[in-house]
Amino acid sequence: METLDVLKTSLLDLHKEVARHGIRLIVGGGYGLYLKQQLLQSQHIETLLDVEIWPEARATNDLDVFLTAEVATDSTSMKVIRSALDKLGYLEIESAKFYQFVKPLRVGQQVKLDLLAGPLGQYEERAKVDVRRVRPRRSVNLHARRVDEALCIEESCTEIEVDGCLSSGEAHEATVCVPQSFSYLLMKLWAFRDRKDDADKDMGRHHALDVLCIVAMMTRQEYEETHHLFSMYAEQEPARAARRTVRECFADDNAIGMIRMREHQLFRRDIDIAAFLRNLHALLKR
């Protein structure tokens, strides 16, 4: 089974178990971008950069699932998710216990699940929080990894219909959410800054390419909304860090962000880099 098929099946399996309890799944990471790319291409939606020269969607064996702050701090909801993971055969990853899981499939194949949560807002008082994780006050052996830079992660998400077969072979349709461009861009710029020199994480090349994809796939309306949000949150550290990263790493075609982007095997030489850089800098301009 191809990697993207495995991820779809795994997402559908999880949705089947939790959706009836009112739990919304927000899919981030590379697979979230893949789902958005498929939607835009199927509906022929006009975007900032022409669809014909987008980088090919990159395969990943990870599912990055954001839980809403309400769910991540609620022991009843987290117990539902924990029960679903146990039923589906997920195993804890010891180094990130209770928020990263892996499901072994056939020989040499597995799917990794990372549970995350953005800023908690009004729900912070009912959570236990440390430097890495968020969990309900009443423990159910399930946490979410803190992603404080994911401002507005629950707002204005793109709803995407995903249909296919469960692991059982049963057909299933799911509605999942993909973060809006502002949140995605904050997270990817933050991740690139932290990984650009990390050989164990491919020197941040995936994150650099994802920054390109996020900008390329914006509609004009998304572009205006993202620019507005960068202005609105200009003094908060995630937005300040994003501006620093763009200024230092994506200043021009010779900057480290562009070098890492061109090093990626899926980078296309016919991409309009000048247009990408112009749009990226204008997005963050105050």
Image (cartoon, rainbow, N blue to C red):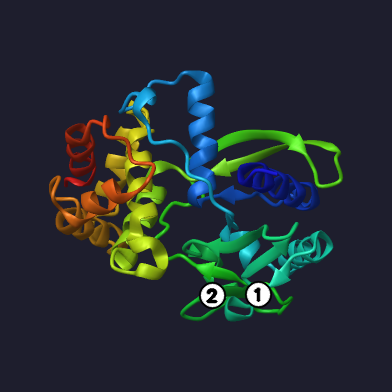
Q: Position of residue 188 (x, y in %)?
A: 37, 54
275 relative to 189 in the view: left or right: left
Residue 214: which quarter of the image? Answer: top left
Q: Is residue 157 visible?
A: no
- State the residue position of label 1: 98
Residue at coordinates 22% horizontally, 52% vertically from top-left? Answer: 259
Residue 145 image position (x, y, % from top left): 54, 69
* Label 2 with label 1: CB-CB less than 8 Å: yes
- The amino acid at mark 2 is Arg
Secondary structure found at label 2: strand
Q: Residue at x 55, y 37 (%)?
A: 35
Q: Nearer the viewer, residue 247 or 224?
A: 247
Say whether residue 94 is left or right of residue 47.
Answer: right
Query: Distance between the Cα atoms at labels 2 and 1?
Result: 9 Å
Image side of residue 231 versus residue 62, left or right: left
Image quarter (top left, top right, bottom left or bottom right) of the N terminus: top right
Residue of label 2: 133
Amino acid carrying label 1: it is: Phe
Q: Secondary structure at mark 1?
A: loop
